[in-house]
Each structure stands twice: as C-alpha cells, then as structure tokens.
Image (cartoon, rainbow, N blue to C red):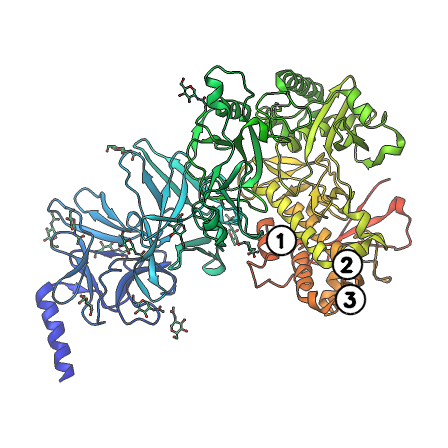
Amino acid sequence: MGFLTHINCLLIFFLIFSSFYLGLNAVNDTITATRYIRDPYTISSNNGDFKLGFFSPENSTRRYVAIWYLNEGYPIWIANRDQPLNDSLSGVLKIHKDGNLAVMNAQSVIWSTNVSISGTNTTAQLLDSGKLILLDDSSGTTIWDSFSHPADVAVPSMKIAANRVTGKKIAYVSWKNSSDPSSGYFTGSLERLEAPEVFFWYNKTKPYWRTGPWNGRVFLGSPRMLTEYLYGWRFEPDDNGTAYLTYNFENRSMFGILTITPHGTLKLVEFVNKMMFLELEVDQNKCDFYGTCGPFGSCDNTTLPICSCFKGFEPRNQEEWNTNNWSGGCVRNVPLNCDKLKNGSKVEQDGFRVYHNMKVPDFAERSNGDQDKCGADCLANCSCLAYAYDSYIGCMYWSRDLIDLQKFPYGGVDLFIRLPPQLLGNAVSGKKGRDSKGIIIGITGTIGALAIAVGAYLLRRKCAPKHKGSQPQNLITKDQKEIKLEELPLFKFEKLAAATNNFHLANMLGKGGFGPVYKGQLENGQEIAVKRLSKASGQGLEEFMNEVVVISKLQHRNLVRLLGCCIERDEQILVYEFMPNTSLDSFLFDPLQRKVLDWKKRFNIIEGIARGILYLHRDSRLRIIHRDLKASNILLDDDMNPKISDFGLARIVKGGDNDEANTRRVVGTYGYMPPEYAMEGIFSEKSDVYSFGVLLLEIVSGRRNTSFYNNEQCLSLVGFAWKLWNEGNIMSIIDPEIQDPIFEKSILRCINIGLLCVQELTKERPTISTVVLMLISEITHLPPPKQVAFVQKQNCQSSESSQKIQFRSNNNVTISKVEGR
Ligand SMILES: *[C@@H]1O[C@H](CO)[C@@H](O)[C@H](O)[C@H]1NC(C)=O
Ligand SMILES: *[C@@H]1O[C@H](CO)[C@@H](O)[C@H](O)[C@H]1NC(C)=O
Ligand SMILES: *[C@@H]1O[C@H](CO)[C@@H](O)[C@H](O)[C@H]1NC(C)=O
Ligand SMILES: *[C@@H]1O[C@H](CO)[C@@H](O)[C@H](O)[C@H]1NC(C)=O
Ligand SMILES: *[C@@H]1O[C@H](CO)[C@@H](O)[C@H](O)[C@H]1NC(C)=O
Ligand SMILES: *[C@@H]1O[C@H](CO)[C@@H](O)[C@H](O)[C@H]1NC(C)=O
Ligand SMILES: *[C@@H]1O[C@H](CO)[C@@H](O)[C@H](O)[C@H]1NC(C)=O
Ligand SMILES: *[C@@H]1O[C@H](CO)[C@@H](O)[C@H](O)[C@H]1NC(C)=O
Ligand SMILES: *[C@@H]1O[C@H](CO)[C@@H](O)[C@H](O)[C@H]1NC(C)=O
Ligand SMILES: *[C@@H]1O[C@H](CO)[C@@H](O)[C@H](O)[C@H]1NC(C)=O
Ligand SMILES: *[C@@H]1O[C@H](CO)[C@@H](O)[C@H](O)[C@H]1NC(C)=O
Ligand SMILES: *[C@@H]1O[C@H](CO)[C@@H](O)[C@H](O)[C@H]1NC(C)=O
C-alpha cells in the first residue's frame, strides 16, 4: 500500500515536471529548468565546501532550504526561513516556470527569488564562495544572488551594505531561537555612513548595540573586538552612494562565519583548513546596551552605579536616577559662555575637558583638518558640544546631545567636551598658551613643528650617506616622509638641563642603549625621564630619529609615552613620562623586590605586554616590530602596569600579512632573539613573539633567560623549561614566591603559551593576537608545544667574553655562532 503510494507519488512528479530530479547528491553545482532537487537531496559547490539542500535545525522537524558550510551545523543562508515546510516528503527546489528559483511543495510555491525575468531560461548555481546565483541564460548576467539577501550570517566577501541616497540597507536578521530560524528580534545593518559602523537593532527600530565607527582598522567603540577578527575587513564606498563593509581572509585555507545571534550578540566562528579553529561571541555588559546612561551620561561597568554625569552636568531627574533608571540622562548645570561671547560682551572663552578611552558618541559629524583645527573649529561654533580626533577618520564633532557614552579600560578615543571656563580648572584650555599648568592642546605651535621638521630633514640628509648600498633594514626611511612630527612638543635644552640638575650623576636612572637616562622635574612639577644621546655614538643619530618617528605616533596604555624631544646644538634628547617603579628586571630578578610581584600582578604584566605588542603589530597607524623586547625595556608605572619602552631598534614594516624582512646588522639582545634572526638576520612579527615568550617564562620563573641552568647540559631558561615540560616536571620552574595551588592552572597555561611563543619554527608560533586570545582564555584549548628553539652553551665555565652559543635546530644538527667581544 505504502509502496504503491510512493510509486504514485513519483509518477505524479514525473508527469507534472516531465524532467528529472537529482536523485544523488550530485557533484553538479547547478539547477536548471530540467534539473531540480528534492528533499532530502543536495547539490555541492564545485570545491565541495558548500551544500545547498533541505535541512532541519536541531530540535525541529520543519524543513528549510539552506546553504551550509561543511555540515548542517553551519548554515549560512536559508531560503524559506519564514515559510517552513511541515513535512519531509514534498519539498522541491526548482526553477519555476516564471524563471525564478522556487521552493515548492506538492501544491504551491512556498518561497521564490521573486525577481521579474523577461521570459528566457535561467540557471541557478552554487559558487565556491557559498553564494547562490540565478543566471539569465541568454545574457549570462546574474539577476539574483543570495549574498544580497542574507539571513543572519556574513561570510567572507559578503557585503554589509547601505545606500546613503536611497536609504536602502542590507539587513541581517537573527533567528528567533536556536531551533527556529524564522526572523527574530535582532537586526544588524550598516549605519551612519559618514563614519560607518554596525548597529544591532531590537525589533527593527530600537538601537540595541553599536560597534562605534570603523576607522579602517578597528571599530572605535568595541575595543574588546580584537583586531585579529577584524583583519581583512574593508570599507568601500562606491559611486552610487552605496557603502559597504566586507571581510576576506588573505589565506584561502581560512574561512569565517559571522552571525547575529538570537539574543543579539555577535558571534564569529573561524576555520582553518576546514577545521573549526575558534568560536568567539563578543561579550556584552550593561554599558554596551545603547544609551544605558541617557544623554550626557557616561557608563563605566567597573563603578557603582555604572552611570555618571560629566563634570558640569547633573541628572535630569535625580529621583529617577536614584532608582537606577538612567535613561533620562544628564543636563548642563552651568551654561556655556559661547552665546554671550557672540553678543559682544567680554567674557572668557569656553574650553574643553578631555576624557580618555571613551566610546565615540552616536551621531558624529565630520570635518576636515588636523587635531588642532578640529578643536579650534569646534570652539568657534557655538552648537559644537564636543569633538574627538582619530588619525584615520579625522575630526569628529557633535552638535546634538551626546548619547551612548562609555568609559573603556583601554581603547576608545579622547573625547573633548565643551565646558564654560569656570569649570575648566586643570582641563584643556580653549585659548592657546593661557595656562601653562594645564594640559594644553597645540603645545608646540608652528615654530616647534618647523624646527622639528627641519631637524628631521637635516638628520635624514646627514644620515643618508650612511645607508648607501641600502640595506633593507632601513624600511623606516621610506615611511619617514609620510610622517609629520608637528604633534610632538619641542623642549628647550636649558629647560631640560635645569630639570635634571644639569644632568647630574645623582639624577641618572640608568644607561640605555644609546645614552644615559636621567630623572627630571619640570617647572610645573611634572616628573620626566630624559634620555640624552651620548655624542660619541654616531650610530645613535639614526636610532634617535627612529625612536622619535616611531614613538611619537604611538599611544597605548602599555607603551611608554614620549612627551617631547630636543634637537639643539649637538644634543639629541628624548623626554618621556617618568615611571616611578623603573623596570621589570629590577623587580623580577631581585630576591627581595620579587615578593612585590604576586601572580595577579605578574599576569597583569604579561597581558599588558601582549596588548602593547598587539598594538604595535596590528592596531597602531604603523606596523611596528620592536626587535628588542626584554625585561629591562618593560617599565612599570605606579600601579605596576607594564609599559614597553626603548624603540631605538624598532622597525616599521609595510602592509601584508607574512612580512619578513632581512637585515645584515643583527641588533637586539641575545637570549631574547629567535634563531632565524640571530643566525640569518630574518625578522618578522614572530621575532617579537619569540622575545615575548622568553619574557613570559622569565616572569613565571623569576629567572633570567641568560643565566644557565641544569649543570651538565648548560641549558638556557627556554631549554630548561622545555626539558622540564617533557619530563612532566614543569611545576618546578615556577618561582616559589608565586607558588599557590589556586593559581596553578593559570600559571601552567601561561607556561604553555610561553613555550608556543618560542617554537623553533616561526609558523608554529602564534601571532600576538592569538597570544592575547589565549591569555584571556578566548581560546580554551592550547596546542601542546613542539620543539622549542634555545641556546646551549658548550661549556658552562667558559668566560663571558667568548661564549659559544649554539642554537638547537629542528633536525638535531647544531648550528653554532660565536659572539665576538
Ligand atoms: C551540470 O549540468 C549542466 C547541464 O546538465 C552542464 O551543462 C554542466 O556542465 C554540468 N556542470 C558540471 C560541473 O558538471
Ligand atoms: C535541543 O534540545 C536539547 C534537549 O532539550 C537541548 O539540550 C539542546 O540544547 C537543544 N538544541 C538546540 C540547538 O536548541
Ligand atoms: C506549516 O504549518 C503551519 C502551522 O501549522 C502553517 O501555518 C504553514 O502554512 C504550514 N506550511 C506549509 C508549507 O504548509
Ligand atoms: C514579489 O515582488 C513583488 C514586487 O516586486 C511584491 O509585490 C510581492 O509581494 C513579492 N512577493 C513575495 C512572495 O515576496
Ligand atoms: C528553455 O528551456 C527549454 C526546456 O529545456 C528549451 O526547450 C528552450 O529551448 C529554452 N529556451 C531558450 C531560449 O533557451
Ligand atoms: C523556539 O521558538 C518556538 C516558537 O517560535 C518555540 O516553539 C520553541 O519552543 C522555541 N525553542 C527554544 C529552544 O526556545
Ligand atoms: C515591536 O514593535 C512593534 C511596533 O513597531 C510593537 O507593536 C511590538 O510590541 C514590539 N515588540 C516588542 C517585543 O517589543
Ligand atoms: C552605479 O549605477 C549605474 C546606473 O545604475 C550603474 O551602471 C553602475 O554600474 C553603478 N556603479 C556601481 C559601482 O555599482
Ligand atoms: C595558509 O595557511 C595554511 C595553514 O595555516 C598554510 O599551510 C599555508 O601555507 C598558508 N598559505 C599562505 C598562502 O599563506
Ligand atoms: C565589565 O565588562 C567586562 C567586559 O564585558 C567584563 O569582563 C567585566 O566582568 C565587567 N565588570 C563588571 C564589574 O561587571
Ligand atoms: C525610566 O525613565 C523614563 C523617563 O525618563 C521612563 O519613560 C521609563 O519608563 C523609566 N523606566 C523604568 C524601567 O522605570
Ligand atoms: C544674546 O543676544 C540675543 C539678542 O541680541 C539675546 O536674544 C540672547 O538672549 C543673548 N544671549 C545671551 C546669552 O545673553
């Protein structure tokens, strides 16, 4: 009976369609007027990565036509998400007689591509990118494609697009829940096309979450979205007013699925060689919800209550505010002076107060010009309430209520909020040079800028003959032209001499690579560190300019800040912020001081260094390889936060992912250098990763890498750690000061990461962004380390002056190199 019905069924199909269906999971990637698919069959893309066919989500019996990557667990597109089939017998995907691709059951069309077609035949094809297209056979043009009609997922080369003229947007709509793919509550789209960013909307109309403007590298309002995930993203406007954001992996073995989840979060699943590599959901806290603190309210999830008003503002409704309903926001309690000024009366000008690490408020407007002009323009316009400057986006200003503000622990922008003069106090003044005590914008003035530019030019000329026969190591000179130094303040030599008691020996903090460093105090009480290049070091000139150029462009909480410089007579002097706790090595390798660094502090230092390096490699305006990371170059601030310093050897490298550069002059510090650099002069981002790994092991063990351990074998710290790891005795390397069962897991994890960083083969070492992810446990499963690269001294007793250092290489052949002097 059932058998007969089945036969009948088939017969009916045969009669109705008088064509054939793909009874097998055919290799062919097309559907034509004569070839269609029936539940439960599928077709594959040519490369086999994608399948198109019928599927049911977990815990559901409904049938949907979907495209998925690898297996049904990764659907990337669904045709009939809001028109499910209720049984698994009747579904067919075919070219309908009107030429559209359609999902049908026995009776009717359930879903259709629904484009008007001028009466010719069409073909549907599943491409290798996972895109399904409908082709007009006669012209060969694509008349419909699935990437322009997305569900909840963006994959590489898909566009998140919006048109500023027509207002048309491509919206990504979440599933209702994990087993129901019908259109859910959250919608993602590209907004604010002047400074584009991604918005998540609740119920299509209520802003729920925003990434902050895309600046070409990061979303300014999402510091927790690490650049690793944003690598390969591009923003491109086209001629017709459409702007779109898209992402692509450079390496074809990689693939990613970006999803807006049913509960309004962003999730990324990344694959390498078709294996799932990582799954990340961008976490949200209360402050991330749009406008939690209302207009002019600032959110900080580390304080209680999380909302506060800016200086000069108070809650609009104190009672409401006290009940933790902050949505009313804040209002100004002292009026601005700007309007009075216009009326011709003589009053003091408004100014700005700067707030660091802020999320860029919504509704930014843009204008041209540098940071100084940005501030001056804002001041001159009474309706301008705040401004911020980002080197990629340029000047942003706000003339409506500031909304969706958040204070981040790191990242974000410096937000300058307009205030009347009586509230300025120590803040940024509107009038240049009025208040020498405050932090004054535009401190340099044009003369300073000119002097520096001229100085830089002369220095470059002076240095130029030196690089003749040009080694590739001078990558920096190419970029130098593009770098303007005008933002960097210039100090007078006399001032610095006075500040350091005439460079008195008692003020000397230490000797850096190219000269002594002194502690000083400016007239206003600010403590500074002054690095004076020794005149004798001809070499230093180049490094000096290098350091100035590199570091003047960098700003990160884990990098030491350059306050200014001095190029006068024969003097080249760099002025830094002063770090009262000096450097990491003075704590780590001192039996008494070491106790100060408990594991929490040490982990904070490890993570901070990693973030600093990440900034250098990925987040800053330049891509920089430091090349001399070591404990003595990690400075510590009051709260024991690490700051990377000494950029004399840093190199700027040009774009591209796998850049390796080569130098004939190997500079750096033995023990922290990876073999490929020490032996062959090849350096890349992975060289810094190696140095970081060594540092990490030093921090965990409290031992210097360059001291040698294990008497018979004369192993360096890295070799010693590797030996202990293989013997299953790695716990014994941990500094007794931090040994505590509570931290054991965390410490072991760090050692594992450290060993991964010092892998013999550069490709086995993780990138610094992966390291950060490992440290913050976004990546939970760490691969076990393989062979590490380390030095072995031939003779433990040999004198320091002629030590023979051997790098263990992969195939047990020992390459040796004698370090002279
Ligand atoms: C798929 O089938 C169509 C028509 O039957 C044919 O033209 C096309 O070459 C086939 N493609 C592959 C990849 O086999
Ligand atoms: C399916 O149902 C099981 C049991 O109720 C549940 O544990 C699982 O999470 C569900 N899966 C999805 C995707 O909802
Ligand atoms: C499936 O069932 C639901 C509710 O029972 C109904 O609304 C829907 O129209 C059915 N779908 C089809 C394709 O028959
Ligand atoms: C198909 O498109 C037409 C206009 O282009 C529209 O009116 C109609 O509602 C659409 N049908 C479906 C099922 O989306
Ligand atoms: C369209 O397809 C039908 C059926 O395969 C075929 O008979 C007809 O010639 C095709 N028409 C064109 C314009 O290609
Ligand atoms: C998903 O939503 C459907 C209704 O849309 C409901 O019947 C089902 O129980 C929900 N499943 C889960 C796991 O919440
Ligand atoms: C969504 O918005 C509509 C009106 O746009 C409203 O009627 C509905 O209640 C809202 N739903 C929720 C869950 O907020
Ligand atoms: C802009 O629109 C014109 C006319 O519609 C079209 O020919 C052109 O291809 C479009 N340009 C882009 C870049 O899409
Ligand atoms: C892509 O990645 C794979 C695996 O990590 C690697 O083997 C391959 O060499 C990479 N290809 C390119 C072009 O970088
Ligand atoms: C603040 O937010 C961050 C990131 O979402 C989270 O890790 C942290 O636990 C939150 N802190 C508090 C006190 O909620
Ligand atoms: C919070 O205050 C606003 C008015 O500022 C009001 O509309 C809203 O209903 C209040 N929300 C709650 C949860 O009380
Ligand atoms: C400025 O003058 C205009 C009219 O000239 C007046 O309406 C306005 O109130 C004055 N503003 C202030 C702040 O005094």
* Disc 3 CB within 8 Å of nearest ligand 10 atom: no
- What quarter of the picture does the N terminus occupy? bottom left
| Residue type, label 2 | Ser
Residue 793 visible in the snapshot: yes
Residue 703 visible in the snapshot: no
Judged from the image, the secondary structure of the residue bearing numbered disc 1 is loop
| Residue type, label 1 | Arg
Which residue occupies the foreground of this view, 817 or 299?
A: 299
Residue identifier under label 3: 732
Q: Which mark is in front, 1 or 2? A: 2
Q: Residues within 10 Å of mark 2 (few under 14, many from 20)?
A: many
Judged from the image, the secondary structure of the residue bearing numbered disc 3 is helix
Residue identifier under label 2: 701
Q: Quadrant of residue 573?
A: top right
Q: Quadrant of residue 414?
A: top right
Q: State the residue at coordinates (70%, 57%).
A: 600
Residue 218 appears left or right of 559: left
For residue 165, above or below residue 695? above
